[in-house]
Each structure stands twice: as C-alpha cells, then as structure tokens.
C-alpha cells in the first residue's frame, strides 16, 4: 500500500556539463540535451495521476558566475525552449510558471516568459514551474520585503504567502549527477521534503528512473515530527 501521495515534485537537474565533457562535446551540447529531458519529464508528470506540480531548477542566482558565453547560451536556449513549448503546454493543458528574480533578464526574455505565463495561466493539468535566476535566500528576502511594504507583520503564514511559489511544501526533491547539496534551492519549501539523489547525469535521466524514485517515495514513512 502507498504511504504517500506525490503532489509537488522539485528537481535539481544537474550534470549537463559533465555529460557533454565525457563525450568530448562542448558544455552547451549538454544543456541542449538537458532541455529535451525537461520536455520528456514534464510530459511524464502531466500524465501522472497524482503530480500537480514539477519545479525545475534551470538557472540559479549563482549561475551568473559562469563564463559569459555559457550564460548567454543558456538565456537563448531558454527563450527558444519556451517559444517552442507553448504549443505543447496548450495541447497538454500545462500551466507554465516562472519563479525567481526575473528583472535581471533581458527585456526580450522577460517578454517571452511573461507571454508564456499569460497564455497558459488557465491550464489546469500540471504546473510546470521553472526556477530562473532563482535563489532560496533571495526568494525569502524578497517575500519578507513584500510583507513589510504592505505594512504587515512577518509570520509563517504571511511570509509563506508572499513567496514566488504558489504552494508551500515540496513532497519530493530529486537531484541528479551525484551531488548531495541544495545549492540554494527552495529553502523554505524543502523544510520537510523527502530527498532523493541519483548519480545519473541529467541528460541521461529518464521517465523510467523517475518512476522508480517515485515508487520509493511512496513507501517512505513521513512523520513530520510526530510518531
Ligand atoms: C545543470 O548542469 C544545468 C545548469 C546549472 C544550468 P551543469 O551545467 O551544472 O552541469 P555540471 O554540473 O557542470 O556537470
Ligand atoms: C544548481 O546546479 C543550479 C541548477 C541546476 C540550475 P549547479 O551546478 O549550479 O550547483 P553547484 O555549483 O554544483 O552547487
Ligand atoms: Mg552543476
């Protein structure tokens, strides 16, 4: 019998660069391959009976430290990806949501993000959330300032409600590539999440592997401090 139902899934898709380097390719080829996997995993999640949202870490507040060319490539890839995916989002009834500080992106990319969010906002089957220029600390600081600007008091409820993400709690976090750290991801929302780490590099990650990890999750004993 299942102990848990998976509603909110978060993924740190890591290992694109190493995947490419292992094959003597440029890191950018790894990001291209990784984008295809985002598409497959999103479709899997949309067809899953209990998943309501999947939140992918696509670009962190720390990723600006990378070489300028890689950052520029990632921005272009994102723009292309969203323009191409819009049709799929509509067909599959997927709502696209971006979280993070979007103000640092070019006006062109900001527009693509805003259009994709607007066009898909009434879709109901799955929330496909992309964390873009996202940092967990940055999100909490921005949320706190929103509460204070409205003259409110900081409580778990008011701060939680002012976060970028429309839901508080992630049920399962998966990180690929063997690294076992959070890298400033969803610090608030991961407070009680189950964690799963796999050595698979993101471009090699498959819906079958995801299914196995979800099966493990469903058998875990989540106590939330109780007994
Ligand atoms: C994750 O893959 C994708 C992004 C951070 C955009 P990496 O680019 O971090 O790949 P590795 O960790 O260098 O292999
Ligand atoms: C985390 O991966 C960010 C994304 C997947 C977008 P990184 O590769 O940037 O994280 P570190 O440097 O290993 O912590
Ligand atoms: Mg990495």
Image: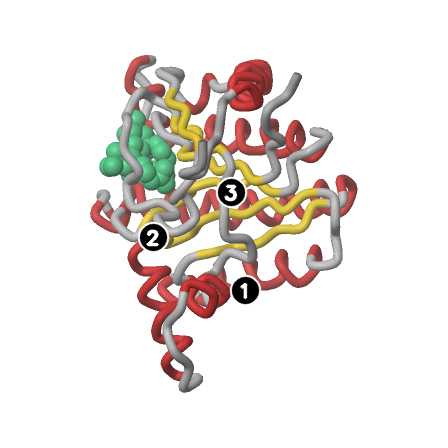
The residue tagged 2 is 136
Depth-wise, is mark 3 or mark 1 nearer the camera?
3
**Which image quarter holds the N terminus?**
top right
Q: Quadrant of residue 85?
A: top right
Q: Residues within 10 Å of mark 1 (few under 14, many from 20)?
A: few
Who's the residue at 46% across and 70% down the image? 158
What SS does tag 1 mark? helix
The residue identified by callout 1 is 111
Image point (46%, 33%), residue name: 223
Q: Quadrant of residue 211?
A: top right
Position of residue 26 measured from the top left corner of the image (x, y, whole percent): 32, 26
Q: Residues within 10 Å of mark 3 (few under 14, many from 20)?
A: many
In this view, the residue farthest toward the bottom is 151
Give x and y (percent) for residue 4.
Answer: 59, 28
Closest to the observer: 192 or 195? 192
**Mark 3 or mark 1: whose residue is earlier in sequence:** 3
SS category of the residue bearing label 2: helix
Counting residues from the start of the chain, the first of labels 3 and 2 encountered is 3
Residue 2 pos. (x, y %): 64, 21
Label 3 sits on residue: 55
User: Compared with residue 105, is residue 63 higher up or lower down, i.e. above or below?
Assistant: above
| Residue at 48 percent of width and 46 percent of height | 78
Label 1 – label 2 distance at C-alpha: 24 Å
Tell me whether the residue at label 1 lies in contact with that at label 2, contact meaning CB atoms closer than 8 angstroms. Answer: no
Q: Residue furthest right?
A: 91
| Separation of marks 3 and 1 at Cα, in angstroms | 21 Å
């Amino acid at each position: 019998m299942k102990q848990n139902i998976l509603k909110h899934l978060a993924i740190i898709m890591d290992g694109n660069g190493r995947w490419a380097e292992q094959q003597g390719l440029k890191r950018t080829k790894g990001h291209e391959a990784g984008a295809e996997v985002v598409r497959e995993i999103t479709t899997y999640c949309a067809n899953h009976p209990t998943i309501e949202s999947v939140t992918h870490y696509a670009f962190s507040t720390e990723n600006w430290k990378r070489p300028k060319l890689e950052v520029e490539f990632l921005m272009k890839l994102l723009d292309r990806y969203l323009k191409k995916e819009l049709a799929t989002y509509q067909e599959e009834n997927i709502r696209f949501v971006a979280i993070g500080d979007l103000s640092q992106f070019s006006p062109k990319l900001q527009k693509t993000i805003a259009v994709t969010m607007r066009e898909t906002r009434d879709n109901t089957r799955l929330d496909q959330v992309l964390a873009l220029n996202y940092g967990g600390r940055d999100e909490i600081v921005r949320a706190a300032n929103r509460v204070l600007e409205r003259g409110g008091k900081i409580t778990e409820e008011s701060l939680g409600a002012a976060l970028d993400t429309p839901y508080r709690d992630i049920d399962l976090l998966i990180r690929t590539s063997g690294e076992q750290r959070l890298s400033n991801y969803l610090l608030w929302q991961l407070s009680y999440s189950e964690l799963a780490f796999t050595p698979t590099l993101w471009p090699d990650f498959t819906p079958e592997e995801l299914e196995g990890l979800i099966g493990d999750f469903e058998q875990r004993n989540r106590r939330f401090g109780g007994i």
